[in-house]
Image (spheres, rainbow, N blue to C red):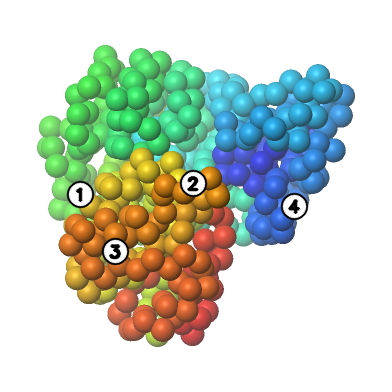
Amino acid sequence: MTKIAFSGAAGNGISPLEQIMIRRGYEVWGSDAGFDAGKDLDRRTALSAAGLHICPQDGSMLSKDTQYLCVSAAINSNNPDILRAKSLGVPIKYRSDLLLEILSSYRYGIAVGGTAGKTTTTAMIGYILDTLGKSPCMVNGGALCNYEGGIGIPNYIYNTGDYCVIEADESDGSIQKYHPQVGIITNISHDHTSLEKLFGYFSTFASHCQNLVMNLDFPYHAKITHPNLTTFSLVNPQADFYADRIVLNNASIEYTLRGRTFTLQLIGRFNVANALAAIAACSVVGINPFDAAQALEGFTGVKARLEKIGSINGITVFHDFAHNPSKIEASLLALKSGGGRIIAMYQPHTPFSARNTGDETAAVIARVLSPEDIIIMQEIYELTAQDTDISSLNIINRIKENGHHNALFLPAKPDTLSYISTAAVSGDKIVIMGAHDNSLADFSRQILQALA
């Protein structure tokens, strides 16, 4: 049995790859600094049950017979596993390169890109193909609610049929590595870097795709061209896949596609766009669009993507991965569509993100929230002592300058928990937003328990 190793084993991008390689018969080892600190225990338990051999992140899992060490672009070069691999002569492989190998091993490769919606769209495509008996492989950054209860983390589907669908990441530029039969661009908005650089990434990605599926509703979509283009839209009837008669309910959405009405067990107009992207992509590889739309009626969503944690005393708690202006706006608008006051907590994940998109985030929040709605911000998750120029308080002040004054800076989770459990009343919707911090899901559940 061939031995391989992964550093950052709990990561959203690494963990599905570990589980797929275990299913492929490899002896798979993993380490994570969070595990060493006693964090992410649910993930540790799930990955161990799936067959991952877990070691401290001190290089001890590596030996001369390790075929390679797989890492994400976020792993520091001073990481003990990397230093140990170099001393032993063990090759180091980036996560995106292993993902490329997996994608390329299937007849039909489908790669989903975009600064918002790609996780849910990837999940939808995987679910459609699996439901329709196509035996797909799916590699995703989010866990599918439909597949909870099995062994491991349900952020992948593994089969050996003809189809593989992956979530393609633009944050590190690695989306440019993929050459799929079908590429999807859900949208392009300001996120990890400048819009100019992002358009460069996505233009290169588009040129590598045999077929391209693209959203006509994001600004400047005409900057991306392709000879084999399939389009989707919520506003342009000329698109190849156009949805109208959209009805937003408290726990579902109805929409009409080519004269037939379908229902999603999700909330938010943006999820209709995600569904169109998935249906369009499946149609390119030969799936009947109505069959795909019908299959999606059973799709129950992705963990941490506006995930309903529960309701108590008329108060509903959601957890959401939203971490850039467009995602925050989409989530808040989805929650507002059903009425009721919103109490939102947003935790920026990195100092860079707060600097890069803080002003836009403040403007979006001030524009979308009503005067009675409350926005709370905790301190930046990965803030260090060296980051003296930025704080979540800066964004709170900008929100107030933009006209929304019901804005609070509560630096730590206990402060937020205490405030929300006291302030929330029947009819409120509470949403906990942020990325990188895997404890936010547990924190959402703590809030629900406190409200009881």
Q: Secondary structure at mark 2?
A: loop
Q: Position of residue 129 (x, y in %)?
A: 47, 39
Contact between marks 1 and 2 (CB within 8 A): the answer is: no
Residue 120 appears in the rendering: no
Inter-mark Cα distance, 4 to 3: 37 Å
In the foreground, 401 or 348: 401
Q: How many residues crowd around disc 2 within 10 Å: few (fewer than 14), some, or many (20 or more)?
A: few
Q: Nearer the viewer, mark 4 or mark 3?
A: 4
In percent of width and height, residue 327 lies at: 33, 49
Label number found at residue 256: 1
Mark 3 highlights which residue?
335
Nearest to N terminus: mark 1 or mark 2: 1
Question: Mark 4 and 1 residues: CB-CB less than 8 Å, in contact?
Answer: no
Who is closer to the viewer here, 431 or 49? 431
Q: Which mark sits nearer the N-terminus, 2 or 3?
A: 3
Q: Secondary structure at mark 4?
A: helix
The residue carrying mark 4 is: 36
Label 3 neighbour load within 10 Å: few <14, some 14-19, many 20+ = many
Residue in the image at 12% along x and 32% along y: 238
Query: Mark 1 or mark 2: which is in front?
Result: 2
Q: Which mark is residue 387?
A: 2
Which one is earlier in the sequence, the residue at label 4 or at label 2?
4
